[in-house]
Amino acid sequence: SRNSAMQEALRSWSIDATLDRSLAQINADRTFFHRAAGRHAMLMQPLATDLSVVQHLNLPTILAIYLPSHPWPKYLTIVGMEGDNVLFATAADRQPLRVNRAT
């Protein structure tokens, strides 16, 4: 999930989304994201905030989602926000999934 989330963030900037295979050896997710971003001349900045800050920054955002049945996080990439809709990257058809913030 972290590979696809990082690839979708890179694609949203029209950057080659090929990730170095050595990144797969990294166990710590934070280290993975820092190194993956750095290899593409990007920065990774952790945020603990609400969606209004993400909307204000107007940058692709990778969310860590913790599910009750999993001890490790799943990652989703926000590629945009339009009004009350959050646009999540989907690898299936490249069309963003629109989710209303109120739901």
Image: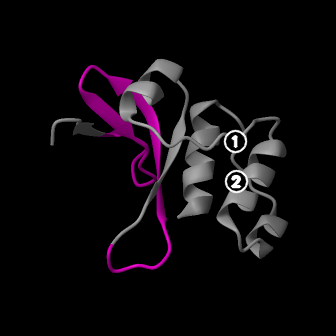
Q: Which residues are magenta?
A: 68-97
Going by the numbered disc 1, the residue's amino acid type is Met
Sequence-wise, the earlier of marks 1 and 2 is 2
In the image, farthest residue toward the left: 103
74 with respect to 103 (left or right): right
7 with respect to 67 (left or right): right
Residue 46 on the magenta segment: no
Task: State which quarter of the image contains the C terminus.
Answer: top left
Give the structural element (helix, strand or loop) at label 1: loop
Where, by quadrant of the figure, is residue 89 drawn? top left
Residue 71 on the magenta segment: yes
Q: Is residue 6 above or below residue 10?
A: below
Where residue 26 appears, as percent x and y from the top left, is 77, 71
Residue placed under numbered mark 1 in the picture: 44
Where residue 73 appears, as percent x and y from the top left, is 48, 67
Going by the numbered disc 2, the residue's amino acid type is Phe
Residue displayed at 66% across by 64% down: 29
Residue placed under numbered mark 2 in the picture: 33
Where residue 57 appears, as percent x and y from the top left, is 53, 22
Residue displayed at 84% across by 68% down: 22
Where, by quadrant of the figure, is residue 67 drawn? bottom left
Give the structural element (helix, strand or loop) at label 2: helix
Cα distance, mark 1 to mark 2? 7 Å
